[in-house]
Image: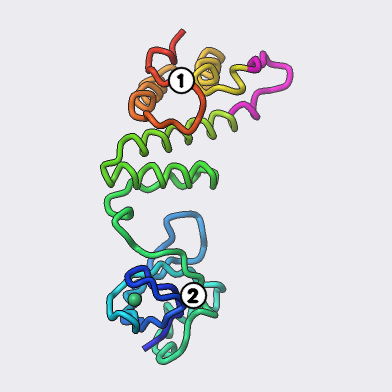
Amino acid sequence: MPELLEDCPRCGAQRTTFDVKSLNVRKSDHQSLQPVIETFTVCRACGRSTVFNLQPRTVDATALFVQRPAELANKNVNSLVRVNGYVNIGDVGATPAPAHLPDEVRQSFEEGAKCHALNCPNAAGAMLRLCLDLASKQMLTIVPAAAQQPNAQQRKDLAPRLNWLIDNHYLQETCMTWFTASGTMGTSLRIKGPSRPTSLRR
Ligand SMILES: [Zn+2]
């Protein structure tokens, strides 16, 4: 069977060998052309199992895993794949991010979704509020130079910025429902701005 050299999340052994018992090749959650390979592995140091997420390094590596997995027997696969973490409780029931999101917004969304799945609403609210902050800052970049511009506080702080985007019709008024929800969820906020839902309104 194939072998993988990686740190063991179960026993802490570093750069230890895992026996790859089975492969599950699936489509990436993002826009990557390369699939994700979930591997059921067993650590030779502790005998415990881990499911690693692998990303093929090349198209040829993908073809090998998909079409000719028998050729991987008794071979180390580290030169063919990158290890992108392992399946853990944070992956259970987490809402996937929309496909079109910019990377930094997607990463915050995914972290927030995992916190929500783990029943950590304060952390989830903080991360989803960070998504709003990042996305609304990006929206300011599409405001035409000749159009009315936000002032310094509206550029800097989330709540005034959202109000300005709605008032100037860059966002729909119905978005306020989501904004007020995020304001009530997060208590340990990572961004500066009012947290009371009514403060989003003038
Ligand atoms: Zn181990």
Among all residues in the image, which is located at the extreme top?
Answer: 202
Residue 165 coordinates in the image, percent (x, y): 54, 19
Q: Residue 38: x, y in percent?
A: 37, 69
Which span is picked out in magenta? 139-152
In this figure, which residue is indicated by the disc labeled 1? 172
Dot 1 or dot 2: first in sequence order is 2
Q: Which mark is residue 68?
A: none
Mark 2 packing: few (<14 Cα in 10 Å), some, or many (20+)? many
Instruction: Identify the element where label 2 is drawn.
Output: helix
* Residue 113 to residue 194: above or below: below
Q: On the image, which quarter does residue 41 sit in?
A: bottom left
Is 171 or 136 nearer to us in this picture?
A: 136
In the image, what residue occupies the spot 48% across and 82% down? 77
Along the line of sight, which residue is nearer the eye, 144 or 188? 188
Residue 193 within the segment the image draws in magenta? no
Mark carried by residue 62: 2
Q: Say if the magenta span includes residue 146.
A: yes
